[in-house]
Image (spheres, helix red, strand yellow):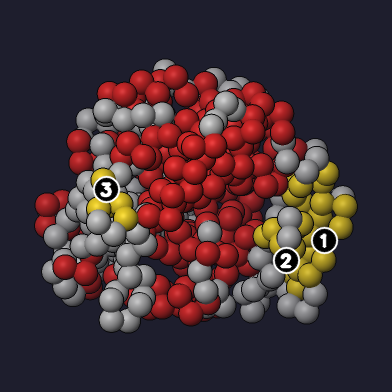
C-alpha cells in the first residue's frame, strides 16, 4: 500500500523508472515518517558525514516527497523544527538577535554544530527555508491544527529574527555578512535567494499571526521590512544579480576547474574558489524553482543564461535543481541531461563520492521533484493541483499518485494529455 502511494510509472523508459524507484525506496527508508523527535541527516542513515546532523536539505529537498506521498511524515519532519523552537530562540539570542534563528547544522537538541564561522553564522537562509517549507505544507494540506500546535509560532518567531539581522541603509535595508546556497560566493550582501526567502517568511508570518499574539504595529513593521529588502539587479541590463558582489569576482575558464564531474574543491583551494566567478550549486535558479510566480519568463531565461554556464555542480543536489528549472521553463534538452546526472548520481557514483560519503539525500529528494514538479509539471494553480507537463521525448506517459487536502489523487500525463482524478 505504501509503495502504491508513491511509485512513479514511466511508459517508454524502463531503466529510468527502475532508477527512480530506487530513489523513492531510499527516501522511504531514510525518512522517520512516524517520529517527530528526529529528522533526516544529510546522508540519512547511510553515513556519519556531518556527524549525522540535519540541514536545510530536509525542508527544501526531502520534505516535498513526504508531503505529497505521506502528509503525516511531512508533518512530523516539521514537528522536529517546532520541537527545536526554544533552541532556535536561544540561538538567536546568542547571535544578538530577536525571535528564532535556526542553526545551520542542527543536532537532536536543536543546537548549532557547525564549527566554521563563515558558514554557520552567515548561512541565515536556513531560517527562512524552514518557514518556506511550513508554507508549502500548509498550501498542500490546509492543516490548521499544525498552525495551532506550533506552526504559527514558528512562522512568527522566525519573522521576528529578521528585523534584528538587517542593517538600516538610506535607501532601505541591507542583509550584510550572508552567504546564499552558492557557498563559493564568499561572504556577501543581499543574496537574492536569501532576501526573497525572507520576504516569503514575513508574508507567511503575517498570514499566521491570528493564531499568535501579534500586534498590528509589529505586522506593519514586517510589511515595511519586506518592502525595504533589496533584490539586486544589474543597473544597466536590469537582470537579477546573485548578490551585491558576485559580479566583482574574477572571471575564470570553468573547464580548467571542472574537467569532470568530481568536485573542484578536491583540486582547488577553498580560498581561491571564494574569489572566482563560479557557483558551487544552484542559487538564483533554485530560488526561481521555489517561487516561480515571483519571476517572469524573461527573467527566468535570463538567469539561466547568466548562471548556468558558471555552475560547477560541486554539490550533489545541483544537477537535480537544474533539471527541475529546465523542465519548468521549456529547456527540454538540458532538463533531460541534468535529470540523468541526478537520477544516476549515487547508483553510478557520478561524482566519485558515494562510497566515501554515503547516499546524498538532498539529491534523491530533488530528483523526485524534477520528475513530478518538472516533467509532469505538478503545481498549484488558484489553490488547486494542476499539470503542465514537459515529458522527455522518449517517455510516452508518466503516472503517479499524490495527496492534497486529505484526499488522494492520481495523475497521468502524456505528450498530448494531462489529467488528475481522485484515486
Q: How crowded is mark 1: few (under 14 residues within 10 Å), some or many (20 or more)?
A: some
Residue 400 pos. (x, y %): 75, 55
User: Quick check: 209 left or right of 398?
Assistant: left
Residue drawn 20% across the image and 36% down it: 117
Residue 251 is drawn in which quadrant? Answer: bottom left
Q: Is residue 312 above or below residue 135?
A: below
Q: Nearer the viewer, residue 398 or 64?
A: 64
Residue 135 seen in the figure? yes
- The residue at the far right in this view is 422
Query: How far separated are the C-alphas under marks 2 and 3?
Result: 43 Å
| Label located before the other in sequence (2 or 3) | 3
Q: Which of 229 and 82 is in front in this view?
A: 229
Question: Do labels 2 and 1 touch, CB within 8 Å?
Answer: yes
Residue that label 3 marks: 168
Residue that label 2 marks: 387
Query: Which image quarter holds the N terminus?
Result: top right
Query: How far separated are the C-alphas under marks 2 and 1?
Result: 8 Å
SS for dot 1: strand
Residue drawn 24% across the image and 62% down it: 244
Residue that label 1 marks: 420
Residue 369 is drawn in which quadrant? Answer: bottom right
Amino acid at each position: 500500500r505504501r509503495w502504491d502511494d508513491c511509485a512513479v510509472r514511466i511508459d517508454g523508459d524502463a531503466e529510468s523508472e527502475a532508477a527512480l524507484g530506487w530513489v523513492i525506496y531510499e527516501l522511504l527508508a531514510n525518512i522517520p515518517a512516524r517520529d517527530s523527535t528526529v529528522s533526516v541527516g544529510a546522508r540519512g542513515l547511510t553515513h556519519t558525514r556531518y556527524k549525522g546532523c540535519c540541514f536545510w536539505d530536509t525542508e527544501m529537498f526531502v520534505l516535498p516527497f513526504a508531503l505529497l506521498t505521506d502528509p503525516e511524515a511531512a508533518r512530523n519532519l516539521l514537528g522536529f523544527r517546532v520541537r527545536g523552537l526554544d533552541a532556535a530562540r536561544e540561538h538567536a539570542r546568542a547571535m544578538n538577535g530577536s525571535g528564532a534563528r535556526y542553526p545551520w547544522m542542527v543536532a537532536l537538541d536543536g543546537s548549532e554544530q557547525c564549527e566554521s564561522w563563515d558558514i554557520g553564522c552567515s548561512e541565515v537562509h536556513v531560517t527562512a527555508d524552514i518557514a518556506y517549507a511550513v508554507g508549502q505544507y500548509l498550501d498542500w494540506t490546509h492543516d490548521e491544527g499544525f498552525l495551532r500546535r506550533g506552526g504559527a509560532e514558528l512562522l512568527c518567531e522566525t519573522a521576528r529574527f529578521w528585523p534584528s539581522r538587517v542593517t538600516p541603509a538610506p535607501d532601505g535595508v541591507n542583509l550584510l555578512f550572508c552567504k546564499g546556497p552558492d557557498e563559493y560566493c564568499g561572504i556577501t550582501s543581499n543574496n537574492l535567494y536569501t532576501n526573497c526567502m525572507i520576504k516569503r517568511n514575513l508574508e507567511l508570518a503575517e498570514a499566521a499571526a491570528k493564531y499568535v499574539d501579534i500586534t498590528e504595529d509589529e505586522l506593519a513593521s514586517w510589511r515595511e521590512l519586506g518592502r525595504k529588502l533589496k533584490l539586486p539587479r544589474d543597473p544597466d541590463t536590469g537582470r537579477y544579480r546573485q548578490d551585491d558582489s558576485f559580479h566583482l569576482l574574477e572571471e575564470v575558464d570553468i573547464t580548467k576547474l571542472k574537467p569532470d564531474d568530481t568536485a573542484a574543491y578536491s583540486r582547488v583551494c577553498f580560498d581561491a574558489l571564494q574569489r572566482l566567478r563560479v557557483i558551487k550549486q544552484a542559487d538564483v535558479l533554485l530560488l526561481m524553482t521555489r517561487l516561480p510566480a515571483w519571476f517572469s519568463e524573461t527573467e527566468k531565461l535570463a538567469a539561466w543564461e547568466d548562471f548556468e554556464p558558471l555552475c560547477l555542480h560541486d554539490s550533489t543536489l545541483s544537477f537535480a535543481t537544474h533539471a527541475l528549472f529546465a523542465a519548468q521553463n521549456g529547456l527540454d534538452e538540458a532538463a533531460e541531461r541534468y535529470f540523468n546526472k541526478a537520477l544516476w548520481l549515487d547508483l553510478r557514483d557520478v561524482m566519485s563520492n558515494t562510497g566515501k560519503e554515503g547516499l546524498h539525500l538532498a539529491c534523491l529528494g530533488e530528483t523526485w521533484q524534477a520528475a513530478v514538479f518538472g516533467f509532469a509539471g505538478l503545481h498549484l494553480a488558484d489553490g488547486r493541483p494542476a499539470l503542465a507537463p514537459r515529458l522527455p521525448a522518449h517517455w510516452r506517459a508518466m503516472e503517479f499518485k499524490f495527496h492534497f487536502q486529505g484526499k488522494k489523487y492520481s495523475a497521468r500525463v502524456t505528450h498530448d494529455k494531462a489529467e488528475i482524478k481522485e484515486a
